[in-house]
């Protein structure tokens, strides 16, 4: 009985995905790619392996093809918490992109560890990390969202500890009135984004797990931060009011 229900559910999922895949306009997926995305979504590991063996390196198949929601097979493996599939895809050199950020966002610890390990093996000195090199128009995350900031937003102690142990550094937001080149340029190009990234950094710094892990005097740090946040609130609303008058 159980297996019957399962296959019905799979059929339903299959036809929905078939339809979604048909409606994808930007890039026409080949039949092999549609099959691949479907097999990944279903967690059909033998099916995925067969496609990779038969078609990787041919013009019928690109392992980095994406579904209509713009998710690569790797992102869908992370969202479905399918560790074995993730490993197979990494072994077949799928583009990693911002997969680590997705894993952190899902609070999927095993994937975070695996992807950090991958990064350590594959990162070249002086080059941006995979999640930094991603095409922004296709990314779910803005450029100021680092792994540590995202883990702090989730207030995930375990992931924060993993990142800090690996040498991730705390965000250091510049003062609201900072006049350094970086701030001036960023303020001029996109002042909303500039304010938003400061808010993102402070939200991360106020996460209790991060304070507990990184501060020698958590109580003092929490007080200092709340004072700083009040000051920031006043200054930023002043800025907004000015903006509205115009
Ligand atoms: Zn600055």
Image (tube, grey):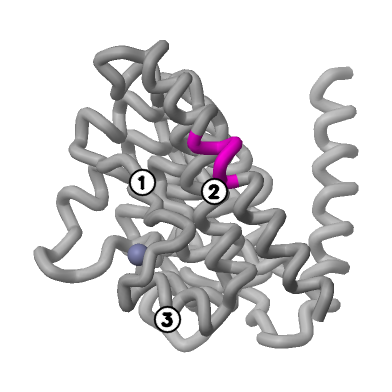
| Residue appearing at x 65%, y 68% in the figure | 70
The one nearer the camera, 167 or 98, is 167
Q: Which residue is mark 2?
A: 200
Binning the other alpha carbons within 10 Å of mark 2 as few (below 14), some (14 to 19) or many (20 upward) gives: some
Residues tagged 2 and 1 counted as in contact (Cβ below 8 A): yes
Residue 71, image x, y percentages: 62, 62
**Real-space Cα separation, disc 2 to disc 1, in angstroms:** 9 Å
Quadrant holding the C terminus: bottom right
* Quadrant of the snapshot with the N terminus: top right
Q: Secondary structure at mark 1?
A: loop
Assess disc 3: are there few (<14), some (14-19) or many (≥20) residues with their C-alpha within 10 Å of its C-alpha: few
Question: Would you identify the image quadrant in which residue 241 lies?
Answer: bottom right
Look at mark 1 in the image and give the residue it sits on: 171
The x and y percentages for residue 155 are: 52, 26
Could you give the CA–CA distance between mark 3 and mark 2, rounded to whole angstroms? 19 Å
Q: Is residue 233 left or right of residue 123?
A: right
**Residue 185 tag number:** 3
**Secondary element type, mark 3:** helix
Label 1, residues with CA under 10 Å away: few <14, some 14-19, many ≥20: some
- Majority secondary structure of magenta residues: helix
Tell which residue pokes out farthest to the left in this image: 125
Q: Is residue 28 left or right of residue 16?
A: left
Task: Decide if residue 102 is on the left or right side of residue 146.
Answer: right
**Ligand 1 located in image quadrant:** bottom left
Q: Which residues are magenta?
A: 228-232
Can I make out residue 82 in this image? no
Separation of disc 1 and disc 3 at Cα?
19 Å
Give me the residue at 34% from left, 60% from top: 92
**Nearest to viewer (mark 1 / mark 3):** 3
């Amino acid at each position: 009985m159980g297996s019957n229900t399962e296959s019905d559910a799979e059929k339903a999922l299959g036809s929905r995905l078939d339809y979604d895949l048909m409606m994808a306009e930007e890039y026409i997926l080949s039949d092999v790619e549609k099959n691949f995305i479907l097999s990944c979504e279903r967690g059909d590991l033998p099916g995925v392996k067969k496609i990779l063996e038969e078609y990787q390196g041919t013009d019928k198949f690109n392992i980095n093809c994406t579904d209509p929601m713009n998710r690569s097979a790797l992102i869908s493996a992370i969202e479905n918490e399918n560790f074995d599939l993730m490993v197979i895809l990494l072994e077949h050199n799928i583009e990693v992109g911002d997969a680590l950020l997705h894993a952190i966002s899902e609070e999927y610890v095993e994937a975070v560890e695996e992807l950090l390990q991958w990064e350590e093996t594959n990162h070249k000195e002086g080059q941006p990390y995979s999640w930094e090199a991603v095409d922004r128009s296709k990314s779910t995350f803005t450029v100021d969202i680092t792994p540590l900031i995202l883990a702090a937003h989730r207030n995930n102690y375990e992931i924060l500890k993993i990142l800090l142990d690996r040498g991730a550094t705390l965000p250091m937001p510049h003062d609201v009135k900072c006049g350094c080149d970086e701030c001036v340029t960023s303020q001029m190009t996109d002042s909303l984004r500039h304010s938003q990234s400061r808010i993102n950094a402070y939200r991360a710094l106020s996460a209790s797990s991060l304070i507990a892990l990184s501060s020698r005097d958590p109580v003092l740090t929490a007080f200092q931060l709340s004072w700083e946040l009040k000051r920031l609130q006043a200054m930023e609303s002043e800025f907004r009011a000015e903006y509205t008058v115009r």
